[in-house]
Image (spheres, rainbow, N blue to C red):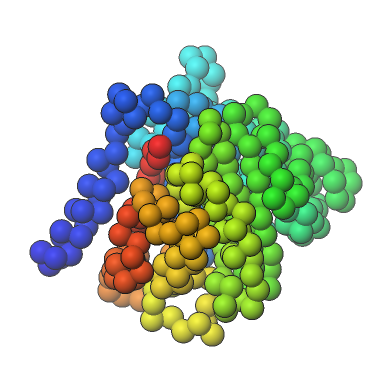
């Protein structure tokens, strides 16, 4: 590793691990984002899954579940679950307790396997909970996964008998819904993802919020305006500095041509769309202090540096060019626990 790379590496980790809340920060409302799965495609055991909960509150939602139990075991090893109290006598491992008690609901952006495989394989031992999604995603889950052919029907509709462990809860775009047994509300907006409808979820509690975005392509490449619509809807949240973090994908680095994006983003497109958000929210200053967590980096079979190295380098350059110096970019890694407030 060269000195420059070592510095980048250290800076990255310092930026993550120098975040323990100060006593004053702990008193402010915040969110805890725990990465259970970080990659997009191919690396089974580390696929999109982000556990989100208000700071100091053990009642969470899991945004996408490409990896579930494997991600909880990995997060248990890094200590990322240590602040969750497992009651004496529960008879459960810490990851087992978190799956069945801490995670109160799933928010599923779309039914591609790298976003639902962990949910499906965990289902026999999971606890009953709602699955929140837009109607098209719920239709895909009930018709093509929980249908007694690919997997037993743990849903509450679809091919009989419907076992009813998971309660499908259809969200209406732009309308906030309380998530039962949590302090959070969730609001969904559709995203364009190469011909498939994906979803962005705004998760709010205690007057602040976090935006989790499933797979998405840029409006200019997708030929739509759903990112533009999303930014317009959440601009007041951003202008008031209530939005604390965005989880967004950058599947490929900037060498990827637009015609090969297949419904995904690059760092250049992430920077461009954040500028669009800033424009709607009153200027670049509105994004100061915002954390942007980059997920869904595609795993690569190629020898040499990991793809996230190129993405990190591109992000630094694109952010500087775009005037996004006030944004804190981080690349998601499995087992990372991040507190934003
Ligand atoms: Zn994906
Ligand atoms: Zn996808």
Q: Which of 273 and 201 lies nearest the eye of the viewer?
A: 273
Task: List x then y, in percent, for residue 158.
Answer: 85, 50
Residue that lies at the very extreme toward the top in this rendered image: 89
Q: Which of 200 and 106 lies nearest the eye of the viewer?
A: 200
The answer to whether 53 appears left or right of 309 in the picture is: right
Q: Quadrant of residue 214?
A: bottom right
Residue that lies at the very extreme toward the right in this rendered image: 160
Residue at (40% x, 59% y) in the render: 284
**Residue 299 in view, yes or no:** no
Quadrant of the snapshot with the C terminus: top left
Q: Quadrant of residue 24?
A: top left
Circle count: 0
Residue that lies at the very extreme toward the left in this rendered image: 3
The answer to whether 178 appears left or right of 102 in the picture is: right
Task: List x then y, in percent, for residue 107.
Answer: 63, 46
Residue at (31% x, 71% y) in the render: 321
Quadrant of the snapshot with the N terminus: bottom left
Residue at (19% x, 53% y) in the render: 10
**Residue 218 in view, yes or no:** yes
In this view, 121 is above or below 226: above
Task: List x then y, in percent, for residue 20.
Answer: 29, 34
In this view, 258 is above or below 85: below
Task: List x then y, in percent, for residue 161.
Answer: 87, 43
Residue at (42% x, 52% y) in the render: 286
Q: Quadrant of residue 272?
A: bottom left
């Amino acid at each position: 590793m060269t000195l420059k790379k070592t510095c980048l590496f250290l800076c990255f980790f310092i930026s993550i691990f120098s975040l323990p809340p100060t006593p004053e920060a702990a008193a402010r409302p915040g969110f805890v984002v725990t990465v259970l799965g970080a990659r997009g495609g191919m690396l089974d055991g580390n696929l999109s899954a982000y556990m989100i909960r208000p700071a100091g509150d053990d009642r969470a939602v899991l945004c996408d579940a490409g990896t579930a139990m494997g991600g909880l075991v990995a997060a248990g090893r890094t200590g990322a679950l240590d602040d969750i109290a497992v009651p004496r006598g529960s008879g459960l491992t810490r990851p087992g307790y978190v799956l069945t008690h801490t995670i109160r609901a799933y928010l599923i952006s779309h039914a591609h396997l790298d976003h639902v495989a962990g949910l499906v394989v965990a289902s026999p031992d999971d606890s009953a909970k709602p699955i929140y999604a837009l109607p098209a995603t719920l239709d895909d889950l009930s018709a093509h996964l929980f249908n007694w052919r690919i997997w037993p029907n743990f849903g509450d509709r679809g091919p009989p008998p419907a076992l009813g462990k998971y309660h499908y809860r259809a969200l209406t775009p732009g309308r906030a819904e309380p998530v039962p047994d949590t302090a959070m509300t969730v609001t969904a907006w559709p995203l364009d993802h190469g011909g498939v409808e994906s979803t962005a979820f705004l998760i709010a509690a205690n007057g602040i919020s976090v935006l989790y975005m499933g797979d998405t392509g840029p409006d200019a490449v997708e030929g739509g305006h759903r990112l533009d619509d999303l930014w317009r809807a959440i601009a007041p949240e951003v202008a008031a500095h209530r939005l604390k973090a965005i989880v967004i994908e950058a599947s490929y680095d900037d060498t990827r041509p637009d015609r090969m994006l297949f419904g995904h983003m690059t760092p250049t497109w992430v920077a461009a769309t954040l500028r669009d958000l800033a424009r709607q929210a009153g200027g670049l200053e509105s994004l100061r202090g915002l954390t942007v967590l980059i997920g869904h980096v595609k795993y690569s079979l190629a020898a040499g540096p990991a793809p996230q190295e190129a993405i990190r380098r591109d992000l630094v350059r694109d952010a500087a060019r775009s005037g996004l110096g006030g944004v804190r970019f981080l690349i998601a890694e499995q087992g990372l626990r991040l507190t934003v407030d």
